[in-house]
Image (cartoon, rainbow, N blue to C red):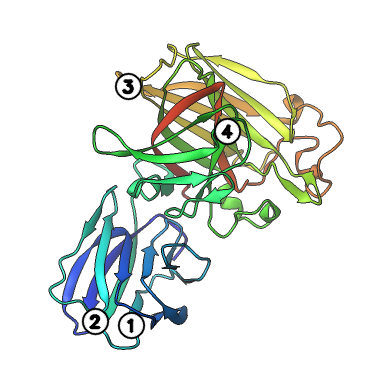
Amino acid sequence: MAQNYVVATVSIKDESQNQLKTGDYKAILLTFNSPGLRQIGVTSSLGSFSGNYENQIFQIVFPNQGSAEVWGSPFGTQTKWKVVSKVDGNQITITIKDATGSNSVEEIQVLAQDGTNWNKLNLSNNPSQVVISINFVAHPSEVPGLVEIHNSNLVLSQEHTIQANKFSTVDPLVDMTKGGEGDKTLYVKKGTDGKNYLTFGGDRTRWNVYLNKDYRDAKDWNKIPIEYANVMYEIEWSPIDEKCKNLSFSFRTIHDPIDGDKEGFGKYGMHWMVGKPEVGIKVEYFHNEHGEGHDFKLPKPIELNKKVKVRMHIWSDPTGKREVTQKGEIQYEDDPTWYEVVNFTYKSSNWGSPPSGGSNLDRNEYEGGPYMKPGIRMWCRSNGGGKFNIYSFKVYKKNN
């Protein structure tokens, strides 16, 4: 089965094969809470682990990249200690049990595929063992020709904060960087409508969405599969105060050292002005070294405290020519129409000449013409010092 956007259809049973719940889920949370240390074991088709733990919490996550992950969180602190089962078209079974035999599963919660709130299951008896059977099916995309590979449902599933240089404890594909000035924290808060949203501020502060959980380091620049080069990022947001200058995004991003302290390719950038009917694009060959910028008109300005939804595409030429096209679309809160506002193709003739510097490892990839390889992440950056709210995001790749 090729990697695809997947839905986990889950059947949850206890050790007596009593059916607890069946449905399509994004994640499951199990809490063991009997006093004292005990041995907890987790087994799946492709891995296992066990150990003595107290107040152990397990989170089973189904990221939209063809796998199921089981994370152990002793004392509420997420660890790297986990089981991963790859999707191969067959059913996956994960068993989590208390080896001492005590009935210590205190709570089971599930997160619906399109939900943002955890639902607690009713347990008539606390089981000592939970068996989770998982089937994966392709999920149809709402955008023709594209496959959704990630969205904001998981990171918005519970209120929490993401500190600088830390990944979300809920979503392994979202982190906050240490760049910029001001409060370098990404917050997940509950709005007055009862729905969770992301919020951050400061000047040049930024958070990332990674394209694949297995490639989150800049040194993975030459490892990430080429299928992640052609992506579309859809995000709904609003500027909150008058300090907001623009919200900017990056594509095919490396931007960090890949050779000692020398950076790899920077990014294809796109920024959306606030209060001015303009969107701009610019290439960064490597850190702080930019090519010529290009500006485009919007139908009307983006206003404070008004939501907009934007779609940003980056495509390589399908015939193999060294050309890359950036597209941008916008939809306003009071208008369901999608307006195409950016459609620009980079070629060798308009690419410019990168200055000296940066890493020599990937220099030939952006010298003489557009950078064709995928990046590892896309950032969302606040410029100007104001606060921005993010209500949802979706990431798509081409359905090859």
Q: Residue at x 15, y 77 (%)?
A: 125
Residue 136 on image: x %, y %: 34, 64
x then y, percent, for residue 57: 37, 68
Q: Badge 3: how crowded within 10 Å, few (<14), some, or many (20+)? A: some
Q: Quadrant of the N terminus?
A: bottom left
Q: Which residue corresponds to mark 1?
A: 98
**Gap in angstroms between the C-alphas marked 1 and 4:** 44 Å
Residue 103 tag number: 2
Residue where numbered disc 3 is placed? 333
The disc at residue 110 is none
Place of residue 352 in the rendered image (x, y in percent of width and height, measured from the top left): 78, 26
Coordinates of residue 257 in the picture (x, y in percent): 75, 47
Measured in 3D between alpha carbons, the distance from the residue under mark 1 to the one under mark 2, in whole angstroms, is 8 Å
Q: Is residue 229 visible?
A: no
On screen, 357 above or below 24? above
Quadrant housing residue 192: top left
Question: How far, Cα to Cα, is label 3 from label 1?
Answer: 50 Å
Mark 3 or 2: the one toward you: 2
Label 1: element kind: strand
Q: Hey, which residue is sitting farthest left in the picture? A: 124
Q: Compare marks 3 and 2 and give the one earlier in the sequence.
A: 2
